[in-house]
Amino acid sequence: MRLVIVGAGYVGLVTGACLSDFGFDTVCVDSDPERIAMLQEGRVPIHEPGLEQLIANNQVAGRLTFSTTYEGVSEAEVVFIAVGTPSRRGDDEADMAFVHQAARDIARALTDYTVVVTKSTVPVGTARQIEAIIKAENPKADFDMAANPEFLREGSAVADFITPDRIVIGAEAERARERLRALYLPLVMRRVPIVFTGLESAELIKYAANAYLAIRIAFVNELADLCGGVGADIQAVIRGVGLDERIGLNYLQPGPGFGGSCLPKDIRALIATGRAAAHRLTVVEAAKSSNDRRVEGLAHRVADAVGGDLKGKRIAVFGLAFKADTDDMRRAASLTLVPALTEAGASVAACDPVAMQAARRHFCGIDWAEEPYEAATGADAVVVMTEWNLFRGLDLERLAQVMKQPLVIDFRNIYLTGEMERAGFTYISLGRPPVMPD
Ligand SMILES: NC(=O)c1ccc[n+]([C@@H]2O[C@H](COP(=O)([O-])OP(=O)(O)OC[C@H]3O[C@@H](n4cnc5c(N)ncnc54)[C@H](O)[C@@H]3O)[C@@H](O)[C@H]2O)c1
């Protein structure tokens, strides 16, 4: 089977690399010539564990190629659309400009029967819209639409793609279902369930999954604050609650507020869909405002910890990416925290093992440190924003020594309170009693 993947970003590249590894001839198309030139030279523009090797293997084997043109579409049996669907400027709805452009370009290149698949996260009704666009652009095109949303997580995207919990395929034509079943056969053989649905259901499943995850995080974040207020320990509460099989322990850790390229924009798009259909999703709306408040309040928490006033304070920020194992800075909580710290008169030294390059264009007037001890040198406080293993494994005594005062504000709960106490820190974490040296 020959495949084209339109959009060579986090989802498109991982999809292309993994499907070519299944043995399919795959062309990844991107409208960004620099990105394609890099990939053709064997360089990978994003950080994703295992991806570089997978791409290299399949490039060498001749199964995976990169192009800025849609030429490959005419020979492809399946074409995936994996372009971005960011929030539209000024409102909550998803911006469909990239998807619609891709649909027009695919339409012009279609020849024989092809299954056109949306892998991007797209609002309900998009597959039918694309169908109409293709028919208008190329009335003779022989194709069927399918919706195959992607559930991979950045940081473990390759592993998630090849061992997913399920594959969701929305398709009405039996021919399209059969072709996609054949495509995913290597996973079906490993007993990955396929959920076949209609187009609208598949589109909604993706948003519903992300909205549920967002609600869970917003809930555990508020619960952590309550624990802090009443002397309970959130880690104990999570374990006691999460061992209930109806609830589960996954995705139940407090943090600085969710960010990233998906949850914030996807819940906004789902809220917009609900409003447009006169079925408001008030629970999702509440999760969104809870999260917005939390992220905006991070700088106040840091100010409180340093005595109320950030003016003249030196703050070391550990981690800038929205989560560990990625260089993705989209809607990272650090994008709100760092400017708020500097506006309040603090000086900031930041350190991230992978996202520094991506982060540099977002911040000005801060110091960049190569490693955490350098960032912490002379600091009034360290703020942990991303749960990188690098920060978990630090020599805490050395950290305390290089700081002006040993104060850590941990928005990821990566340290044990006992070890922080032994190392002499004042340690403020989420939903656990603060550690205060005598
Ligand atoms: N990133 C994730 O973790 C993740 C997970 C699941 C689903 N998704 C969804 O997948 C989609 C893609 O997300 P992403 O993070 O990979 O985006 P991305 O921004 O990393 O990549 C999108 C790529 O598409 C290219 N592009 C845009 N218009 C194009 C066109 N007309 N023709 C060819 N290329 C074009 C861009 O140049 C870019 O390289 C989004 O809808 C997103 O919500 C993302």
Image: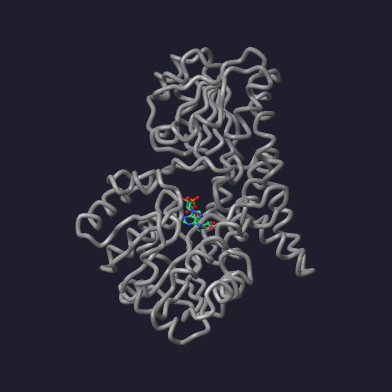
Question: From the viewer's perspective, is 215 left or right of 80?
Answer: right
Give the quadrant of the C terminus. top right
Q: Quadrant of residue 131?
A: bottom right
> Which residue occupies the extreme bottom position in the image?
174
Q: Quadrant of residue 355?
A: top left
Question: From the viewer's perspective, is 203 left or right of 161?
Answer: right
Vertical order, 315 against 250 (above or below) = above
> Which residue occupies the extreme left position in the image?
61
Report the residue at 42% width, 48% height from top.
Answer: 155
Vertical order, 248 against 111 (above or below) = above
Residue 425 visible here: yes
Front-lying residue, 4 or 205: 4
Residue 438 visible here: no
Report the residue at 51% width, 34% height from top.
Answer: 320
Q: Quadrant of residue 210?
A: bottom right
Front-lying residue, 194 or 75: 75
Front-lying residue, 252 or 317: 317
What coloring was used for the rendering? one colour
**Residue 347 in picture, x, y percent from top left:** 58, 17
**Residue 116 in picture, x, y percent from top left:** 47, 72
Report the residue at 36% width, 68% height from top.
Answer: 3
Report the residue at 46% width, 54% height from top.
Answer: 153
Give the quadrant of the N terminus. bottom left
**Residue 58 in picture, x, y percent from top left:** 25, 58
**Residue 46 in picture, x, y percent from top left:** 40, 44
